[in-house]
């Protein structure tokens, strides 16, 4: 029985237990709900939780530990002589898993029977043909020991899967029966249910925190590995980015950092004024009907995929800037440039700035507007001298969050700014960013023992530090100055 089917059976048992538990609680008081400590639904929930939670935890733990146990046993069956020159034990184990999968598929499709499997030998010429017929391709000949290991792998996996199904289903049934036996009028089912919900909320928070810690730890570990192979001083202060997988690489981050900040600066110069003016108009001047139309129309920009923006930059904005600005002014001949990527990215950021700023401006108390009008100020004077100063911390936070979004963008830069890593002030020259080079360094056949590949993790950590700093700065500004207007 597959793991998915086992989980479905457990959910079915728990669901049935919910309805049985609810009915049992009502029958215990002859339908008089007032005699129950909790509502009938809570009694059903306790049965559902007792039937589902322990069984699913065991199932997930089993699925995590089973491959480790099986592979540790099978690895011991592979002798050093079975490992070809230039190969490794890990590659042999990959062949074992593929062969075991192929044997399962062959039996499922009728191409092989269990009796034939027992007599199957690596000396037979049809072994590779059999595996090929079910879509399993191997790079080397099948050795007898590898075939035996594959058969054992398949048998152990099937045995442990069956054992898991039996144990999990029995545990689910036992939990349901035990919970049903506890249903009495004075049983505090609501407390049990709310405790379980609280535990679920804590678990969800813990998962989010552990995920963040895992991301940071993986970046730090691989970055430390990179700095053992490549000097940190050269990475941080070199003005050249020239990775050569054959050796002699220059992996300085400064050209990439400059390109990232330059493109982001152009995007913010384009997006912030437009987004802020849109927010002021929607919150202070637009009628309710106009606002109901314009605001959703602008926010549609936030839902457009970045690859579409990239195509727009490549086909429309780039040639337009090249033909009407760069070439006539003698500033460049390429349609890929910082200005192209910056303008298109700025268009993408407009809804970020406008929506956040609009929410902040609307949060300014109406009493401040009324006080300004009472002193004889016009609407424009009120906006300039009262509303914007009051909303300034939130607006700055919105701008910094938009900057973090711009720094992490990839597709628009790939298609709009090019891939040249250089230090240049000309906005009509092609440049690149950190995110683009992370992708390029991890694309294709990569060997995670070379500095040219590991540098992607150092770049990722650098980008993480920059965006984290901007986010922390935004939160600090918002929290510090918001208190003055509450």
Image (cartoon, helix red, strand yellow):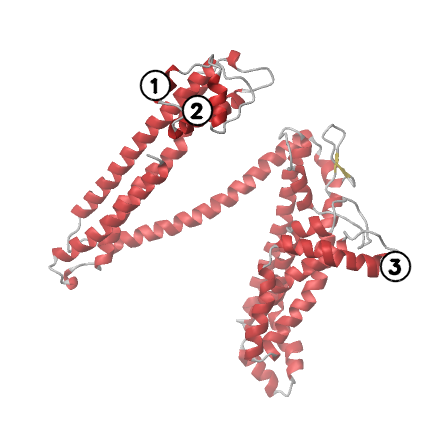
132 lies left or right of 112: right
Distance from the alpha carbon under mark 3 to that under mark 2: 66 Å
Using the image, tell me which numbered label, if any, was put on residue 329.
Answer: 3
Secondary structure beneath dot 3 equals helix
Q: At which x and y percent is residue 349? A: 64, 61
Q: Which residue is mark 2?
A: 71
Image quadrant assignment for residue 315: bottom right
Find out whether the residues at labels 3 and 2 contact each other: C-beta distance under 8 Å.
no
Depth check: 244 or 479 in front? Answer: 244
Q: Which residue is mark 1?
A: 115
Observer able to see residue 76: no
Disc nearer the start of the sequence (3/2): 2
Depth check: 265 or 94 in front? Answer: 94
Q: At which x and y percent is residue 468? A: 60, 50
Give the mark count. Answer: 3
User: Disc 1 or disc 2, which is closer to the eye?
Assistant: 1
Can you name the residue that lies furthest to the left here?
30
Observer able to see residue 407: yes
Q: Residue at x 55, y 79 (%)?
A: 289
Q: At which x and y percent is residue 209? A: 48, 47
Depth check: 210 or 247 in front? Answer: 247
330 lies left or right of 31: right
Disc 1 residue crowd, few under 14, some 14–19, many 20+, Cα 10 Å:
few
User: Disc 1 or disc 3, which is closer to the eye?
Assistant: 1
Image quadrant assignment for residue 372: bottom right
Disc nearer the start of the sequence (1/3): 1
Secondary structure beneath dot 2 equals helix
Find out whether the residues at labels 1 and 3 contact each other: C-beta distance under 8 Å.
no
Q: Residue at x 64, y 37 (%)?
A: 442
Query: What quarter of the picture does the N terminus occupy?
Result: top left
Q: At which x and y percent is residue 110? A: 38, 27
Image quadrant assignment for residue 312: bottom right
């Amino acid at each position: 029985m597959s793991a998915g089917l086992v989980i479905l059976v457990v959910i079915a048992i728990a669901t049935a237990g919910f309805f049985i538990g609810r009915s049992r609680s009502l029958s215990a008081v002859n339908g008089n709900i007032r005699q129950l400590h909790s509502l009938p639904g809570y009694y059903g929930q306790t049965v559902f939780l007792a039937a589902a939670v322990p069984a699913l935890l065991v199932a997930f733990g089993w699925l995590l530990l089973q491959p480790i146990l099986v592979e540790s046993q099978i690895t011991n069956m592979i002798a050093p002589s079975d490992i070809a020159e230039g190969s490794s034990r890990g590659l042999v184990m990959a062949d074992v898993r593929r062969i075991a999968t192929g044997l399962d598929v062959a039996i499922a499709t009728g191409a092989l029977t269990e009796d034939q499997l027992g007599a199957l030998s690596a000396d037979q010429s049809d072994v590779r043909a059999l595996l090929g017929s079910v879509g399993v391709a191997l790079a080397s000949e099948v050795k007898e020991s590898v075939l035996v290991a594959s058969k054992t792998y398949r048998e152990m996996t099937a045995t442990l899967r069956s054992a898991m199904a039996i144990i999990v289903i029995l545990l689910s049934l036992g939990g349901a029966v035990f919970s049903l036996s506890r249903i009495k009028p004075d049983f505090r089912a609501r407390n049990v249910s709310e405790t379980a919900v609280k535990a679920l909320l804590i678990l969800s928070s813990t998962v989010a925190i552990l995920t963040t810690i895992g991301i940071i730890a993986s970046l730090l570990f691989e970055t430390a590995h990179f700095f053992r192979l490549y000097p940190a001083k050269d990475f941080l202060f070199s003005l050249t980015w020239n990775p050569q997988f054959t050796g002699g690489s220059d992996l300085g981050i400064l050209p990439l950092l400059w390109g990232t900040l330059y493109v982001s600066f152009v995007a913010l110069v384009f997006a912030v004024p437009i987004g802020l003016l849109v927010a002021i108009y929607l919150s202070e001047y637009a009628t309710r009907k106009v606002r109901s139309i314009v605001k959703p129309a602008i926010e549609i920009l936030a839902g457009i995929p970045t690859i579409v923006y990239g195509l727009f930059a490549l086909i429309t904005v780039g040639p337009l800037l090249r033909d009407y600005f760069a070439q006539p002014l003698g500033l460049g001949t390429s349609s890929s440039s910082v200005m192209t990527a910056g303008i298109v990215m700025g268009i993408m950021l407009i809804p970020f700035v406008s929506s956040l700023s609009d929410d902040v401006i609307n949060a300014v108390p109406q009493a401040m507007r009324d006080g300004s009008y009472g002193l004889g100020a016009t609407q424009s004077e009120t906006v300039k001298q009262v509303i914007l100063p009051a909303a300034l911390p939130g607006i700055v936070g919105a701008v910094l969050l938009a900057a973090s979004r711009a720094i992490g963008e990839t597709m628009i830069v790939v298609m709009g700014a090019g891939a040249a890593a250089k230090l240049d002030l000309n906005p009509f020259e092609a440049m690149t960013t950190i995110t683009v080079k992370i992708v390029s360094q991890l694309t294709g056949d990569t060997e995670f023992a070379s500095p040219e590949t590991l540098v992607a993790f150092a770049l990722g950590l650098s980008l993480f530090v920059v965006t984290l700093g901007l986010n922390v700065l935004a939160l600090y500004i918002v929290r510090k100055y918001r208190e003055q207007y509450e």
